Amino acid sequence: MIAPESTLEIRPGPPLQVADIRTAIIRYELANPIQYGQWRITHREFALVRVDTVDGYSGFAYGLTRDGPISEVISRSVTPIYKGMIFENPADAFYRCKLTSHAVLSAGTGMRALSLVDMAAWDALARVRGQSITHLLGGEPTPRYATSIIGYPPGMSAQGIYDEVDGLHDAGWRRFKAPISPDLELTLSRMKSARDAAREGWLGFDFNYSMSDVTDVVDFAARLDDLNLGWIEDPYPPGDASAVAAIRSQVSMPVAVGDDQGGSYYPE
């Protein structure tokens, strides 16, 4: 056992030896930039990570870079540790690597980079053993909910989002999630239209980290009360558990958080 945290048990089987790690960056420029509060999104950038084994297998993982230097961190701080390593449990490799550079790999871009390699290592081990990751961890596959992400770009009109959801509903979709718009009044009208078109379907709303005051979140959530929302999502940037607790205590619908949440420095 490499570190106290490395307690995840998996089914026994042959080990994995890392031959190399490769990273590709894919960037897509948005035709319509997205504005969430002070956060302006002009593009989507993804890191694709490939972990190759000495036996000729490859595991893959990908995720948003959020404009962090993912490939640089992997090449400088992660690959030199993983390359040549032999392990039966990828969790051991994860913590062994993390211990070599706590300041870089414990949060933020560093944790994102290490986590991508970790996921690719799990994928590689599953392929080495001829198993799905679900079976590797001792589980069984279960059905997953499919949710249609609607209302993009966020400036789409209320009629536009109605037409979109109405068409999806006719096609058999029953779960929908829409983002906040630059204007709260437009947001409210969009959500009302989405609910009308969704009929009895599940409908979620994403604040996309755009709020900075608990009262503002609670007040706007109250205006959404009669829409029977499945949840409101990410009203605050990651890491402020006290604000999330305050919001949860004052709104009627569930509050979903966790997107981009992570790192060793989140004691909350």
Image: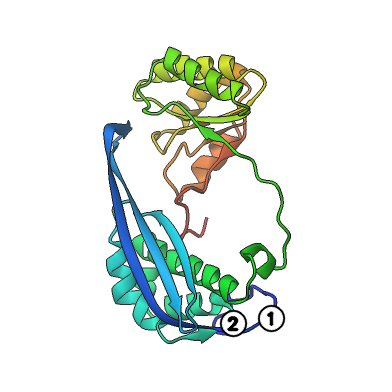
> Which of the 4 image quadrants contains residue 203?
top right
Q: How is the image coloured?
A: rainbow
Find disc 2 in the rendering and name its residue: 88
Instruction: Classify mark 2: helix, strand or loop.
Output: loop
Relative image position of residue 86 (x, y in whole percent): 51, 86
For this view, does 173 lie left or right of residue 101? right
Please tell me how crowded label 1 is: few (under 14), some (14-19), or many (20+) other residues with Cα within 10 Å.
few
Q: Amino acid at mark 1?
A: Pro
Distance Cα–Cα, label 2 vs label 1:
8 Å
Vertical side of 54 occupied by 226: above or below: above
Q: Which residue does the image show at 63% across and 27% down from the upper left? A: 172
Q: Which residue does the image show at 65% across and 45% down from the upper left? A: 144
Find disc 1 in the rendering and name its residue: 12
| Residue 264 in view | no
> Which of the 4 image quadrants contains residue 255?
top right
For this view, does 113 lie left or right of residue 217? left
2 or 1: tag closer to the N-terminus: 1
Q: Circles 2 and 1: CB distance less than 8 Å?
A: yes
- The quadrant of the picture occupied by the N terminus is bottom right
Instruction: Classify mark 1: helix, strand or loop.
Output: loop
Relative image position of residue 18 (x, y in whole percent): 45, 81
Q: Amino acid at mark 2?
A: Glu
Residue 196 is marked as none
| Residue 126 in view | yes
Residue toward you, 43 or 180: 43
Relative image position of residue 268 (x, y in whole percent): 52, 55
